[in-house]
Image: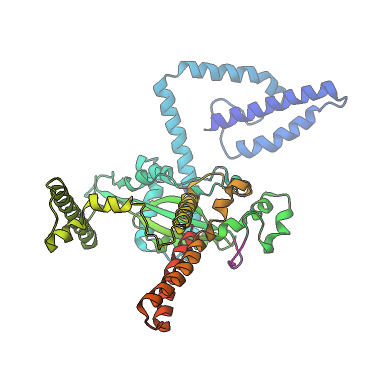
């Protein structure tokens, strides 16, 4: 590690000297040796003062020695590269990794011990996190599997990518095994637990209506700046119904409340809202009574469909009429009879046949909207393109699909008036207003529920 650091410093110095020589050809005022020495003195002493001399390198390097020793350094490196075998290179890389992990975990442990006193987390979570850090210090495979399975920084964040989900299967299949000689040798200490975290920036109260292509009113002036925070404020309105999703892998001893407590401690100073949505462990699939009941019902109706279809086929080919009531009930489940009714296009002369076209177009419109809107937007990349796409004239059918169900309000009101007038005319009975109002409120309430499903399914 120290050899690599010193070689890097040599390369920086050589590059700086080459740059100064190129600049001398253009400018008449060359860089003096004193300037180079002053720069080197600000870089090298900080490294060499804390580390002893190693591998034959001196702690005092002048500008002249840099140019003279550059060739010897390269020669030594090349010789070392050629003389070391592949196994020795891997062993050296292992040593460097252990040193790096040990120093990193040492710094993390100091900060963790200092800040964990104010956290209200369980003892099992503290124990498992400590064992995880010890495993990272010793570069254990299972310990690095926790880090590898967790989501990292989001790529393409400025273009609207809002998720870094990590590796779910790798996380829940990771088991921390005790490798110390003793009574617990070879036993599992804890397993991986996958947790999904939603992160949102500070937002105002959610309004009933807002436009995706316009910044929030509270951030309109702030978003006109030129830095990255101002740029992010231009699309803060997306966070009214979306959130950034991170997947992290934590020890099973930490409960969602423990993780939420740690998140609150990390985000309390930057006003970011981080919430643990769920945490999952690897569990064997269990058949609950509800699942067993649903499967039993599906098998029962499937059996009824099979029996009804066979009875329908037998009477069709035998050219017999189904007379008994039990057989007629079974034929109600027949796929053949129900399919014929489904594709039948015949209508009575007293019906409003033109409304079938309205139904078809409205249903097609709703299916089109659900194809685009009834999805998890957090799985997509480049969501900022939606601002451009939604301005396309051919995309207006999707953007304005929230009014697709309103056509059924029109058809429902028309059919109610049409059918009610015919019933009163034929039966000669008085019109019952209370029953009519209750029936219509029930139908409208069901239609409104279907319409709001389009809106809130996006959440």
Relative vertical location of residue 299 with respect to residue 447 in this rendering, above or below: above
Q: Is residue 445 visible?
A: yes
Side (left or right) of 442 relative to 34? left
Overall secondary structure of the magenta stretch?
loop
**Which residue is located at x 84 percent, y 23 percent?**
26
- Report the magenta residues as a range: 202-210
Residue 227 belongs to the span the image colors magenta: no
Residue 206 belongs to the span the image colors magenta: yes
When asked about the image quadrant of residue 179, the answer is top left
Side (left or right) of 389 relative to 427? right
The location of residue 47, given as percent across then percent down, is 61, 37
In this rendered view, identify the residue nearer to me: 212 or 413. 413
Relative vertical location of residue 47 with respect to residue 346 in this rendering, above or below: above
In this rendered view, identify the residue nearer to me: 140 or 410. 410
**Which residue is located at x 39 percent, y 47 percent?**
134
**Which residue is located at x 14 percent, y 45 percent?**
317
Q: Is residue 287 visible?
A: no
The location of residue 263, given as percent across then percent down, is 49, 60
Q: How is the image coloured?
A: rainbow
**Which residue is located at x 54 percent, y 32 percent?**
2
């Amino acid at each position: 590690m120290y050899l690599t650091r010193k070689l890097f410093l040599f390369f920086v110095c050589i590059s700086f000297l080459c740059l100064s020589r190129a600049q001398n050809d253009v400018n008449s005022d060359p860089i003096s040796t004193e300037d180079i020495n002053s720069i080197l003195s600000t870089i090298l002493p900080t490294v060499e003062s804390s580390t002893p001399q190693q591998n034959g390198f001196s702690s005092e390097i002048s500008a002249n020695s840099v140019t003279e020793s550059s060739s010897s350094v390269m020669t030594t490196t090349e010789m070392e590269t050629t003389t070391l075998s592949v196994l020795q290179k891997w062993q050296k890389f292992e040593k460097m990794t252990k040193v790096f992990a040990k120093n990193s975990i040492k710094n993390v442990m100091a900060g963790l011990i200092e800040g964990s006193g104010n956290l209200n987390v369980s003892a099992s979570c503290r124990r498992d996190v400590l064992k995880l850090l010890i495993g990272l210090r010793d570069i254990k495979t299972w310990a690095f599997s926790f880090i590898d399975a967790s989501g990292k920084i989001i790529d393409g964040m400025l273009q609207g990518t809002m998720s870094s989900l990590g590796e779910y299967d790798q996380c829940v299949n990771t088991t921390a095994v005790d490798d110390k000689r003793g009574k617990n040798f070879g036993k599992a200490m804890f397993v991986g637990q996958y947790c999904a975290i939603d992160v949102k920036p500070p937002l105002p109260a959610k309004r009933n209506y807002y436009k995706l292509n316009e910044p929030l009113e509270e951030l309109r002036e702030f978003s006109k700046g030129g830095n990255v925070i101002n740029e992010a404020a231009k699309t803060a309105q997306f966070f009214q119904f979306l959130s950034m999703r991170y997947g992290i892998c934590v020890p099973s001893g930490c409960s969602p409340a423990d993780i939420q407590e740690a998140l609150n401690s990390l985000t309390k100073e930057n006003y970011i809202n981080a919430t643990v949505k769920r945490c999952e462990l690897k569990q064997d699939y269990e058949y609950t009574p509800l699942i067993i009941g649903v499967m039993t019902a599906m098998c029962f109706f499937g059996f009824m469909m099979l029996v009804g279809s066979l009875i329908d086929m037998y009477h069709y080919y035998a050219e017999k009429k189904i007379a008994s009531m039990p057989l007629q009930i079974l034929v109600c489940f027949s796929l053949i009879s129900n399919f014929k009714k489904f594709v039948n296009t015949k209508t009575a002369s007293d019906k409003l046949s033109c409304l079938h076209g309205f139904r078809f177009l409205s249903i097609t419109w709703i299916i089109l909207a659900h194809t685009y809107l009834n999805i998890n937007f957090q799985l997509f990349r480049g969501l900022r393109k939606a601002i451009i796409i939604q301005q396309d004239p051919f995309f207006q059918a999707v953007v304005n699909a929230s009014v697709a169900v309103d056509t059924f309000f029109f058809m429902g009101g028309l059919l109610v008036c049409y059918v009610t007038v015919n019933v009163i005319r034929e039966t000669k009975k008085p019109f019952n207003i209370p029953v009519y109002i209750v029936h219509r409120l029930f139908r409208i309430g069901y239609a409104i529920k279907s319409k709001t499903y389009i809106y809130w399914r996006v959440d």
